[in-house]
Amino acid sequence: MCFRAVIFDLDGTLADTLDDITDAMNHALARHALPTHPREAYGELVGEGVRRLVERALPPDREDLAGEVLEELARYYVDHMLDRTAPYPEVPELLDRLSERGIPMAVLSNKPEPATRWMIDRLFGGWTFAAIVGGADGVPLKPDPAALLAIAHTLAIEPARCVFLGDTRTDMETAVAAGMFPAGALWGFRDRAELEAHGARALLERPLDLLDLFDGATARR
């Protein structure tokens, strides 16, 4: 298969956002005198949108506070989302090399769309993305494939010729449902076993390994 485009997840794929997510979520919990969680726990809690993150982080008997905690999280995160967040090593070089080859690039995240666009602009503003899509009213979150298919339509490239690179089971399920090639980022928030179990057809140890897919080397690692 000759691939013609790549669509990236954001958190855990292009950028390591976990420290700032941890700090923001723990801040919101602490403001309501609720127990906080260690960084490694958030690697399992994220991936299905901010509302689902809050639901998972709350104690089971305090779901009544979900709305208030979500508002506090949003207020804090908007001012602190780049305190410690940064692109993963090799990602800037990968984007350079893809751009040099003329390979269209896009981003699909379950992070709210304003935060997604703001982060892409500040961390990756030197590169051109044909589409940047985040969570918004009327846009179903991953693993629903609708947004991914809409991006392929925007690119005018059939889904089977698109690689979707992500780091969670949600990303792999989304790619499978859209008929795209699911590539798993092993530098992200989840492990090899999860990615394989949910449909990854290639597992990449480092960002520059993505180039192998466009050179025809698609074997599992």
Image (tube, rainbow, N blue to C red):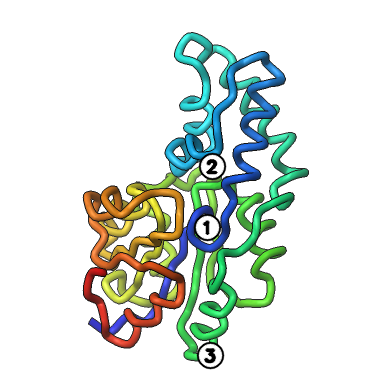
Marks 3, 2: nearer the viewer: 3
Q: Position of residue 43 (x, y in %)?
A: 47, 42
Q: Measure the C-alpha gap from mark 3 to mark 1.
A: 21 Å
The image quadrant of residue 208 is bottom left
User: Left or right: 175 with respect to 71?
Assistant: left
Q: Which residue is located at x 45 percent, y 49 percent? A: 189
Q: Residues within 10 Å of mark 3 (few under 14, many from 20)?
A: few
Q: Nearer the viewer, residue 208 or 49?
A: 208
Q: Which residue is mark 1?
A: 10
Label 2 to label 1: alpha-carbon separation: 19 Å
Front residue of this view, candidates 190 and 4: 190
Label 1: state its secondary structure: loop
Secondary structure, mark 3, is helix
Q: Is residue 158 above or below residue 117?
A: below
Question: Which of the marked residues, 3 or 2, is nearer the chain's N terminus?
Answer: 3
Q: Nearer the viewer, residue 162 or 221?
A: 221
